[in-house]
Image: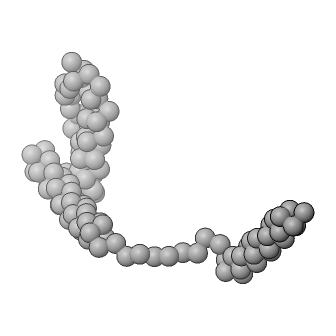
Amino acid sequence: MAEVDFTIGHKQYTLSCQEGEERLLKRAAGMLDTEAQQILSQAGRMPEPRLLLLAGLMLADRTSALEDRANAAERELARLKSNPQKVEVPAVPQDLADAFAELAARAEALAQKAEDSLISE
């Protein structure tokens, strides 16, 4: 097992984790420490259990807000998937499409003339 050292608030910790999970543990500890530092900057020094509780509650509140936003986005995505609106966007400008149609008509006329001249020979 790997061991990870980190600081939360004003205290050092060491935790064991599975190999390969060190980065995740350090990231989680960093998030908790960020919240703890904010609390300490506003309230000053406080007992470790209270600091950890408040920091955990702040993270839980932020997580809850993010979950609400994710759920709203998933509902909107499901709504859009169940009732898609057809939007037509012209890939070719109309004047260019008209020019191509005219060229196609001329090519057809020339092909017809060539065919007629072969038949009459």
Picture mark count: 0
Relative image position of residue 11 (x, y in whole percent): 21, 38
In front: 80, or 13?
80
In-image side of 30 versus 45 (left or right): right
Whether residue 95 is situated above or below residue 35 in the rendered picture: below
Residue at 25% in and 35% down? 25
Outermost residue to the right: 121
Residue at 28% in and 36% down? 24
Whether residue 2 is situated above or below residue 102 in the rendered picture: above
Residue 111, by quadrant, is bottom right
Residue 69 visible to an observer of this rendering? no
- Quarter of the image for the N terminus: give it: top left
Residue 105, by quadrant, is bottom right
Residue at 83% in and 64% down? 119
Relative image position of residue 60 (x, y in whole percent): 16, 56
In front: 43, or 6?
6
Whether residue 62 is situated above or below residue 45 in the rendered picture: below
Whether residue 87 is situated above or below residue 10 in the rendered picture: below
Outermost residue to the top: 1
Residue 97, by quadrant, is bottom right
Relative image position of residue 30 (x, y in whole percent): 30, 43
In-image side of 94 versus 87 (left or right): right
In-image side of 28 versus 116 (left or right): left
Relative image position of residue 74 (x, y in whole percent): 25, 63
- Quarter of the image for the C terminus: give it: bottom right
Q: How did the renderer colour the structure?
A: one colour
Residue 19 visible to an observer of this rendering? yes
In front: 79, or 33?
79
Residue at 28% in and 47% down? 31
